[in-house]
Image (cartoon, rainbow, N blue to C red):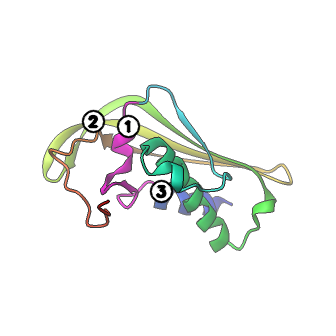
Amino acid sequence: MRGVLHGFLGTYVSRYSDYEGYLLFGFLQDSSSPLVFDLLQAPDRGSSTTNPRAFAATLAAEKFSEQVKKAGLERSMIREAILTLEQTGKTGMTFVNGQSRLAQELTFSASVVMDNGRQFRQSCSAFVARHDPATELRSGRARDA
């Protein structure tokens, strides 16, 4: 499970997690309270297309499911799996398309309880600038409606 959590966080907390072609996590900077996602929830792409938070939850569940399958584990072996996104209050500078931007540190904490009671937890942090289409370039992966 340690490998699953490492792979999950590595894939989820990457530039490839985008919303409408922009870094997903920049859309979540307005959240003053932690965001908590159930990683065992069935992904629902339909309700997540117009809401960045719903999209973040759906993407997290998909990425977690992919890592569980890659590890050859059965979903029934996992009793609980939660991802928490929380702003730490730390600020720093980051570069967005060559421009220096103020960023907030986000901590991504994943925790799992297995069916045998064993618990696993892994975290990582990233500095993320608030979404600003004036300074961000849209990814070529974006799909226009």
| Element on which disc 1 rests | strand
Q: Earlier in the sequence, mark 1 or mark 2?
A: 2
- The magenta-colored residue range is 12-30
Residue at mark 2: 92
Q: Earlier in the sequence, mark 1 or mark 3?
A: 3
Q: Compared with residue 83, is residue 61 higher up or lower down, i.e. above or below? A: below
- Relative image position of residue 45 (x, y in whole percent): 52, 57
Which one is in front, 40 or 99? 40
**Left or right: where does residue 38 sit relative to residue 92?**
right
Q: Nearer the viewer, mark 2 or mark 3?
A: 3
What residue sits right under mark 3 in the picture?
12
In 3D space, how far apart are the residues under numbered discs 1 and 3 (Cα atoms)?
16 Å
Q: Nearer the viewer, residue 48 or 141?
A: 48
Quadrant for residue 31, please give it: top left
* Mark 3 Cα-neighbour bin, 10 Å: few <14, some 14–19, many ≥20: many
State yes or no: residue 73 in magenta.
Answer: no
Viewer-nearest residue: 77 or 88: 77
Q: Residues within 10 Å of mark 2 (few under 14, many from 20)?
A: few
Name the quadrant of the C terminus.
bottom left
Is there CB contact under 8 Å for labels 2 and 3?
A: no
Cα distance, mark 2 to mark 3?
Answer: 21 Å
